[in-house]
Image (cartoon, grey):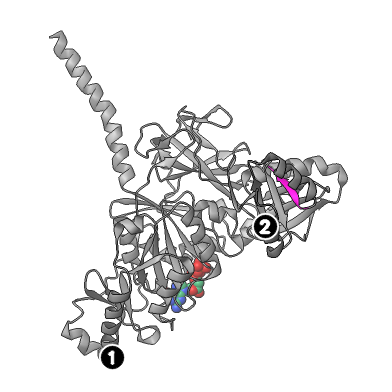
Amino acid sequence: TAATTTDIQDGQEAALTSKPAATIAREVARRRTFGIISHPDAGKTTLTEKLLLFSGAIQLAGTVKGRKSGRHATSDWMDIEKQRGISVASSVMQFEFRDHVINLLDTPGHQDFSEDTYRVLTAVDSALMVIDAAKGVEEQTIKLLDVCRMRATPIVTFMNKLDRETRDPLELLDEVESVLKIECAPVTWPIGMGKNFRGVYHLLNDEVMLFKAGEEKADGAYEIIKGIDNPRLAEMFPLEMEQLKMEVELVHGASHPFDLERFLSGVQTPVFFGSAINNFGVREILSALIDWAPAPRERDATVRAVRPDEQPFSGFVFKIQANMDPAHRDRIAFLRVCSGRFEKGMKVKHLRLGRDVKLSSVVTFMASSREQVEEAYAGDIIGLPNHGNMQIGDSFSEGEMLTFTGIPYFAPELFRTVRIRNPLKTKQLHKGLQQLGEEGAVQVFKPVMGSDLILGAVGVLQFEVVASRLLNEYGVDAVFEGTNTSSARWVSSDDKKSLADFETQLAHNVAYDAAGNLAYLATSGVNLRLTQERWPKLQFHATREHA
Ligand code: GDP
């Protein structure tokens, strides 16, 4: 009988330990974490609202806008952020749809465009590209897609605003393919546009979804007519159907059929047409994200790759937002969970500092409620309050020494020199900039020759934020001025002598960043090209990994 007791105990133990494993695997499989890439005004905010509407996370459209205008007093802090309406609450929106947990990460655009926008994309598993069909591929979309390409992130494309006069759909696909270098697989196809927008034809399901303007409700079902040859369609829209059949023939002949593998490897993007403001075509993209986009995948770390369904918890910080509460100067570090299960109050190791941290007052992001979520799995984002001891790229685990890789710094495109009115504050200035640099708020370069520090950013608001934080948090009244720097590249080489010569000969244009990496500050595109040609033994990099 003793043996039986042990057997039972073993069995119970096995049940106890295998249950969390099964739960983790199930939770990971139902998660989708994505961001929206778009140029300002393409419709990102409108689409975000509609996505939340579908999930029942919000009852009426307008919530996201409401946040933009700063009615969310509890999550607005710094004056500048109040004005611009940046809030932690809309940084991550988690909602459920069709038994899936969706994490939508905000990619700040407009004036809020910054390195954060880029880095958010390193924390997602897929992206939704929104294009204004009247405008086509625009500048910011190109930049953001380049960042997605670094990790071969799968992209779903939404051609928006078909209720307006747009460009020719075939021409739009052509532009995406040639400018963005990604294969297009149209899944829906528009029937007419502007005043004559009739709906979309689903190429895979062979059905037409009829357009109705002004749909505000999530359950607003659209009439669906089966079969492109259905006589009802020919009756309703004789002209448009003629045109559609011609186009569909062209599309079948000239474009790529949808291929899940090619999508998952980032080579191909399924394309949908619709109108976000009319809530038309939105359900289809949400379905594509659920059916086709990947659940959290394996992530590379320094010692090994980490699977999302591993039991021990791990994750990394990809964004830091400051001043939740001006009185306490708190910061929130946004951590992407990479494996295991986060539980409120658990103890984890902050690997860079080698310190145990208790995660008790963690912020989580359910769009539908203010409730604190008590657990999180791979793909979820949690917010860790801290007092400035966290940096972009910091990794956390239950003890194993892993540092997640692939969290880059991007070469800045805008530059300012910084000076202070009161020279006695030099020390504070340096301390402040060091910390702000580590947080990823701005990049700081110290030229080899000369005493002015040079700040680099990708969005112009970053300088305003830094000036205001220097004043409020470090008591430094700094003046920013233009510089003749136009771009920066990190420089490396196996040839130490070349590197040393480079540093002495070009001392006026060579600088060290906050982490001690050598960088070249070019005065123009031509200057950068010539320098690269003259120093063939050096490598010039537009991104660098977190140290
Ligand atoms: P964001 O800058 O990408 O967040 O873009 P918004 O969502 O704020 O939209 C920019 C403008 O385009 C707003 O005036 C929207 O009302 C409008 N808009 C968005 N979607 C549509 C659409 O499907 N059709 C039309 N006609 N306008 C749209």
The residue tagged 1 is 239
The amino acid sitting under disc 1 is Leu
Above or below, 67 relative to 74: below
Task: Residue type at mark 2: give it.
Answer: Glu
Residue placed most toward the observer, 261 or 323? 261
* Residue 165 - label: none
Quarter residue 222 falls in: bottom left
Residue beneath label 2, please?
A: 533
* Residue drawn at 21 percent across, 84 percent down: 233
- Of the 4 image quadrants, the one containing the C terminus is top right
Marks 2 and 1, Cα distance to the nearest angstrom? 58 Å
Q: Determine whether the residue tagged by mark 1 lies in a helix, strand or loop.
A: helix
Asked whether, in this view, residue 441 is left or right of residue 246, the answer is: right
Residue visible at 28% across and 76% down in the picture: 253
Range of magenta residues? 509-514
Q: Nearer the viewer, residue 260 or 424?
A: 260
Q: Nearer the viewer, mark 2 or mark 1?
A: 2
Residue 95 is covered by the magenta coloring:
no
Disc 1 crowd rating (10 Å Cα; few below 14, some 14-19, many 20+) is few
Residue 341 point in image, percent of width and height: 38, 36
User: With 122 as the anchor, is 266 left or right in this view?
Assistant: left
Pointer 2 with pointer 1, Cβ within 8 A: no
Q: Examine the structure image and report whether residue 513 is included in the region drawn in magenta.
A: yes
